[in-house]
Image (spheres, coloured by chain):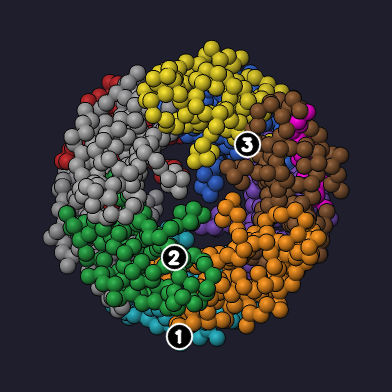
Chain colours: A red, C green, D cyan, F orange, G purple, H blue, I yellow, J brown
Amino acid sequence: MPDVSMLETFKNPSDAPYVIEHVAEEFTSLCPVTGHPDFGDVVVRFCPAPGRDGGVCVELKSLKLYLQSFRNEGIFYEAVTNRIRDDLAGLMKPVWLEIETRWRGRGGIRSTIRARHGEVPASEG
Amino acid sequence: MPDVSMLETFKNPSDAPYVIEHVAEEFTSLCPVTGHPDFGDVVVRFCPAPGRDGGVCVELKSLKLYLQSFRNEGIFYEAVTNRIRDDLAGLMKPVWLEIETRWRGRGGIRSTIRARHGEVPASEG
Amino acid sequence: MPDVSMLETFKNPSDAPYVIEHVAEEFTSLCPVTGHPDFGDVVVRFCPAPGRDGGVCVELKSLKLYLQSFRNEGIFYEAVTNRIRDDLAGLMKPVWLEIETRWRGRGGIRSTIRARHGEVPASEG
Amino acid sequence: MPDVSMLETFKNPSDAPYVIEHVAEEFTSLCPVTGHPDFGDVVVRFCPAPGRDGGVCVELKSLKLYLQSFRNEGIFYEAVTNRIRDDLAGLMKPVWLEIETRWRGRGGIRSTIRARHGEVPASEG
Amino acid sequence: MPDVSMLETFKNPSDAPYVIEHVAEEFTSLCPVTGHPDFGDVVVRFCPAPGRDGGVCVELKSLKLYLQSFRNEGIFYEAVTNRIRDDLAGLMKPVWLEIETRWRGRGGIRSTIRARHGEVPASEG
Amino acid sequence: MPDVSMLETFKNPSDAPYVIEHVAEEFTSLCPVTGHPDFGDVVVRFCPAPGRDGGVCVELKSLKLYLQSFRNEGIFYEAVTNRIRDDLAGLMKPVWLEIETRWRGRGGIRSTIRARHGEVPASEG
Amino acid sequence: MPDVSMLETFKNPSDAPYVIEHVAEEFTSLCPVTGHPDFGDVVVRFCPAPGRDGGVCVELKSLKLYLQSFRNEGIFYEAVTNRIRDDLAGLMKPVWLEIETRWRGRGGIRSTIRARHGEVPASEG
Amino acid sequence: MPDVSMLETFKNPSDAPYVIEHVAEEFTSLCPVTGHPDFGDVVVRFCPAPGRDGGVCVELKSLKLYLQSFRNEGIFYEAVTNRIRDDLAGLMKPVWLEIETRWRGRGGIRSTIRARHGEVPASEG
Amino acid sequence: MPDVSMLETFKNPSDAPYVIEHVAEEFTSLCPVTGHPDFGDVVVRFCPAPGRDGGVCVELKSLKLYLQSFRNEGIFYEAVTNRIRDDLAGLMKPVWLEIETRWRGRGGIRSTIRARHGEVPASEG
Amino acid sequence: MPDVSMLETFKNPSDAPYVIEHVAEEFTSLCPVTGHPDFGDVVVRFCPAPGRDGGVCVELKSLKLYLQSFRNEGIFYEAVTNRIRDDLAGLMKPVWLEIETRWRGRGGIRSTIRARHGEVPASEG
């Protein structure tokens, strides 16, 4: 079961704002209704808080293990997206954060969900 | 015959604004003049009303059946697009909604129609 | 209902062997079990019998109408492919003929079926 | 010779603003200097005037015939683009209209011309 | 745990040889050493035995469930490929059968494994 | 009207066999039934007879003008292909020659026609 | 040697603002340090001054010859870009003009240079 | 070890603002934790200070050698990106500068980091 | 320095012939003349000897480390290719083996080298 | 002027047959009739004679300079191809050699020329 305590952070090495984007192309969870597997990409995009203010970045390997822990969870697209947004926003307290999940499709329909935390600048949206 | 009563909803699991996009790549209806089939994609993109305000999301399987029900309808491109916009806007009362239909083409001309409900933010247009 | 009598032919304008390939990208029929629509491409590839021997080619518009007539048929992938092969081979008596159907997929599995009539040369396979 | 009287319209079925885009990928005319053929795409993009105000949309088959009528005209890229813009703007009196012509190229140079009528919103440009 | 008894068949509707190819793009299993998930495509390509000789084809939905049952198996690339080949060859006794697994990659290396049963014609290899 | 006398040749500068392929991507003619324009690519591929035996190659600019002369001809796909094959084979008397025409499509069906003269080696087919 | 006097113009056939873009994909010059050839694309994008105010457009064939005249010039990327911008801005006195040069790369680094004249609207940037 | 003194500059040949973008597609460094190699692209995008104010551009060959000097450095993605930004901003004192690093991926996650110096205009972001 | 003793093997789990292909997309070594880095892909494709005859397959992680050990070697394209072929052929004694190296290019020339051991079947070449 | 004496060789480091392919994507020469530049790719593909028999490979930098020396030559497509074939076959005396030139196109026609020396195996053709 996914648990925010699996996630680790490291101190932001910079005080100037910049953008980090991680694209995990091998995400899978289960449909809570049918039990069939869902497959998709998860995009994590954020501007970390400045290092001098205690800002942190999520550590890449712990992010991978956290995402893998959804493998046998029965959970809707919308819930996955909002949950990852809440877990990472709570963990890192970033300037802004955007989670995008892109699902391969079921019954001929492909879906994308985008949830945000904070004020995402127009140039990054 | 398409009927809005085929569509089902579920309560929006979040109160924060986010975006949902469904792309149905296997849409088909009939040309009302010639009776020949038209083929295209239908994109449904919206920001649901917050859950705490009674906001809902359209349920994916009912959306698929609703779209399939156009299969033997004689209906123009513009009418398909405006009808889906009206049916889904009436059903979900979302913050905003955009319907885009992209048609494979007839006589060497490919067409795209985009209709909106509410104020679509510049970053999503 | 598909009916071979919908198909028309014209006299092959050449006596030398050559190859004709038609790719219909907007084929749809129904799954006989679930009633859900299937979507795919149908490829018709053949070498017509020489004109001096009474060889004929299938006329393009009648082929289009014949393929459209599967729209509301409940029929399996394998049966569609074998039926088109048999109908066109019976109609044209070509030197060789190959039918390939490529299906968009259901449940995450895309399928392709290839059926032949006569001896397809290695260079055309 | 192209003639605006070839174009037909139908009443806009909606009062809310929406966007229609037609892409004709098989346009050809002649270079007025050399007589050699030019090939290109013509994109017609517009927001029709509301139906309740007498707004109309161009009918697709008449648009196709109108575009085909340039086939043996000797006319420059810039003139084709401005002429189609003027003919369609005069015909439909749309909220806004944009014509884009994309030419395959001569002498290793590919060209694109974009002409507008009315105020095209930033989100559609 | 994968079990060949999950697989169902239907009678081959034809006596003439033809080729069936199923591409499952959402396969996942576990690395038996590290426990990390592997992701890949599984291609099943075969010529069924003629219907008059009792030839059968694998049923698509049962194939999907069979492939899903590898989800939590710890198993090497080579073993997955050989096992599917053996299970399907034993089940259908086809004229020939080829299994190809294409893996997304680990440590910057992507792998493909191809195993065969019977004599695959050069034109299909 | 297309006329083989428009075509010019130059002496093959080599005695060793080699292959020349010209791809004309802007071919257009008219459908003899409806009068509507057809658009496609014409591929000319051949091995010229050796220079010491009087072998010749078609000159590129004359080939372009010859292909442009089909612009206002009403002619079927099959007839275009066989005619170009016959005209060029008669002109150049090459070791072998292959003409392939690939048509953009009408009514959702794209077509390709391939006609040959002489023995095309397997490696070039 | 490139010389602005090679460039010719014609009167802008329109008084309304519109955009012209020419993409020359076969540009080559020489590195002034090593003498090795550089290869790239040159994009010329501008809004001509209105015809009624004496506005002109650059003539396409003269533009091609002007660009070819850089073939044996030793000149840096930045200088090519600024020089073409200055020559064309001086020649046409357009409302705005943008030159973009995209270079194939040397030593594993591909470069793009973009220079502007006048106020390029956000929608065209 | 990377050292800003490896970098050379040349005087900006223009006083008008313009944009230079260099894309180095063969960047490699080492993961400071595991010692395994990382591979990625480095994009350097900037507007140089005007030549009349002493503005300079980084010389391309010295940039290549500077980037190659990271080959055996153990350094995190974020640190690479911030370091290159600081080194080049200090060297050139440009109007604005953006560094983007795009990493091929580890453990199924691809990452992109973007750091800026000065005010990057919206049209260039 | 690359050393064949870094490579490990495991027993081939099958006695029937099949094909294994590994594509390493992040290979780098040094040019022995200039010291500049070379980048490329290495493809290892082979049919292992049957398990009952003591046949083995190369272990994936050891293959990755072996390939990484070329990072600071000065070695020509041809020598890399032949060396990997010899090392893996000696290690596994496979039925056949093919090594293909594809290099990103230097001075505008991209190179590919293919070396073989044993008799590669036409269908795999 | 191109001159075979510009080309250098090095001893083939292997006695086993293998294949080397160089793709030069930035070739340019002049049309001998119009003087306009032609642009294309040149592919050199060969199997060198075994090292123990004195076999040699063409050195990459000298090949680049040799190809650059065609820059201001007026020469036909066919002559370029046959000349490079003859020069390299005479220089290296390889087991077999194939030269392919692919030209960007003039007047809407793209051309490819392929000339061979010796017996090119079917698997490499």
In the image, taking residue C50 as reference, residue G60 lies left or right, namely right
Crowdedness near tag 2: few (<14), some (14–19) or many (≥20) residues, C-alpha within 10 Å = some
Q: Where residue G4 appears, x then y in whole percent?
A: 79, 61
Please tell me whether residue G35 is drawn above or below residue F108 in the rendered image: above
Q: Which residues are magenta?
A: J54-72
Disc number at residue D6?
Answer: 1
Q: Quadrant of residue A113?
A: top left
Q: Secondary structure at mark 2?
A: loop
Give the labeled residue for mark 2. Answer: C95
Question: Where's residue F56, x and y in %?
Answer: 75, 65
Tell if the residue under mark 3 belongs to the same chain as the one under mark 2.
no
Residue F61 drawn at (x, y percent): 72, 69
Report the residue at 81% width, 60% height from top. F52
Could you say which is closer to the camera, residue D57 or residue A37? A37
Q: Residues within 10 Å of mark 1 (few under 14, many from 20)?
A: few
Q: Are marks 3 and 2 in contact (CB under 8 Å)?
A: no
Mark 3 is on which residue type?
A: Thr
Q: Tell whether J33 sits left or right of D69.
A: right
Check residue J58 for magenta coloring.
Answer: yes
User: In the shown orientation, is residue D2 left or right of residue A39?
Assistant: right
- I40 or C30: nearer the eye? C30
Residue type (three-letter) at the residue carrying disc 1: Met
| Residue drawn at the location 68% of the way across and 36% of the way down | J47
Looking at the rendered structure, the kind of residue marked 2 is: Val
Residue named by callout 3: I112
The residues bearing labels 1 and 2 have C-alpha atoms spaced at a distance of: 46 Å
